[in-house]
Image (tube, helix red, strand yellow):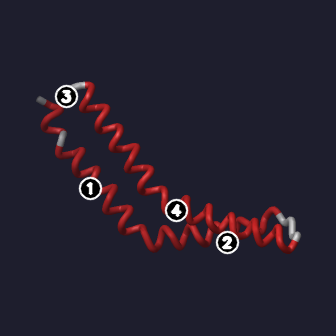
Amino acid sequence: MSQGDILRIMQSAIFLIIEVSAPVLLAGLVVGLLVSVFQAMTQINEQTLVFVPKILAILLAIVMLGGWMMTRLSEFTTGLFGMVSEIVK
């Protein structure tokens, strides 16, 4: 296995991490932004008000997209295990 192959695998892993984590992070970002706008409009400056809606949004995103996330991760892992025979040569 060459250095180029290793770099390609690492690049694929990084893109997969970004792809899988992006929906969850975006859900937290959108909810945090909406709560911040609400706090600015009502002048409620409670620091803990953001946490509960963010946690609920992130959990909802994980519940809705968890199957897709696991499928993507298991496909990548299966591909890596399939390459073991090439590495051992």
Label 4 neighbour load within 10 Å: few <14, some 14-19, many 20+? some
Going by the numbered disc 4, the residue's amino acid type is Val
Q: CA distance from mark 4 to mark 3?
A: 34 Å
Q: Quadrant of the C terminus?
A: top left
Q: Image quadrant of residue 49? A: bottom right
Q: Which mark is residue 53?
A: 2
Q: Secondary structure at mark 3?
A: loop
User: Who's the residue at 40% across and 43% down the image?
Assistant: 14
Residue position for label 4: 24
Name the residue that disc number 1 marks.
75
Counting residues from the start of the chain, the first of labels 4 and 2 encountered is 4
| Element type at mark 4 | helix
The residue that label 3 is drawn on is: 1
Q: Is residue 47 above or below residue 64?
A: above
Local packing at callout 3 (Cα closer than 10 Å; few below 14, some 14-19, many 20+) is: few
Q: CA distance from mark 4 to mark 1?
A: 20 Å
Looking at the image, residue 57 sits to the left or right of residue 15; the answer is right
Q: Amino acid at mark 1?
A: Glu
